[in-house]
Image (cartoon, grey):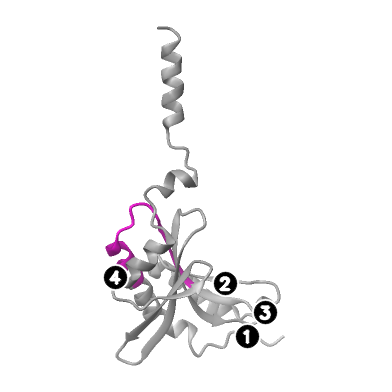
Amino acid sequence: MKILAPLAIALAILALPTGRADDVASGAMSAEELKATIANLGYEVSDIGAGWQEIRIVHDRSDRTITFNLDLAVSGDSRHVWLVTYVAELPPLENLAPMPLAKLLAANDGLRPASFYIHESEGAAPRLYLSLTLANQGLRPVDLREAIDVMERSMARSVDLWTDVEWSIER
């Protein structure tokens, strides 16, 4: 009996979640399920490679129509679903005007859970994106629809911060 108690404890410890990707994957949406769910929500889905899906969003405001592509993907470890949209190409960071960036940074607070970020890769101009990340655990179609709607509203609310903006400063 003394040997069985430590064995039972050891087995119980081994059964605890470890926080690894394979623990999350059991309740996570796969890339194929993501694509099917987006299509079932009524969007025309394009596979743009490397596991990314793209939908086109058209938002009518009283003063203009905003059209953008929204890219969606499941992260490599299946823990997250990413929603990302390209906003603008920027000048080299050392020539970037601070005021438009300060306005975007301030706007992030009101756009949550979406936020702006800059991606810089070697050999390419920096790019401005708006993104939102969802936990990929028990994700339902209604959650995905809500996230898409948040991205659409965020783009519509912030359009004046990234269109017709002078991003560059003279040096």
Instruction: Select label 3 or label 1 by which is in front.
Output: 3
Can you say which quadrant of the picture contains the C terminus? bottom right
Instruction: Select label 4 or label 3 by which is in front.
Output: 4
Q: Which mark is residue 118?
A: 2
Q: Nearer the viewer, residue 116 or 94?
A: 116
For the view shown, which residue lies furthest in the bottom direction?
A: 63
Please provide percent x and percent y for residue 116: 49, 71
Q: Which mark is residue 150?
A: none
Q: Nearer the viewer, residue 5 or 33?
A: 33
Which residue carries the number 1 mark? 168
Q: Which mark is residue 40?
A: 4
Q: How many marks?
A: 4
Please provide percent x and percent y for residue 63: 33, 92
Magenta segment:
130-148
Element at badge 1?
Answer: loop
Element at badge 2?
Answer: strand
Which residue carries the number 3 mark? 92
Can you say which quadrant of the picture contains the N terminus? top left
Q: Earlier in the sequence, mark 2 or mark 3?
A: 3
- Label 1 Cα crowd, 10 Å radius (few <14 / some 14-19 / many 20+): some
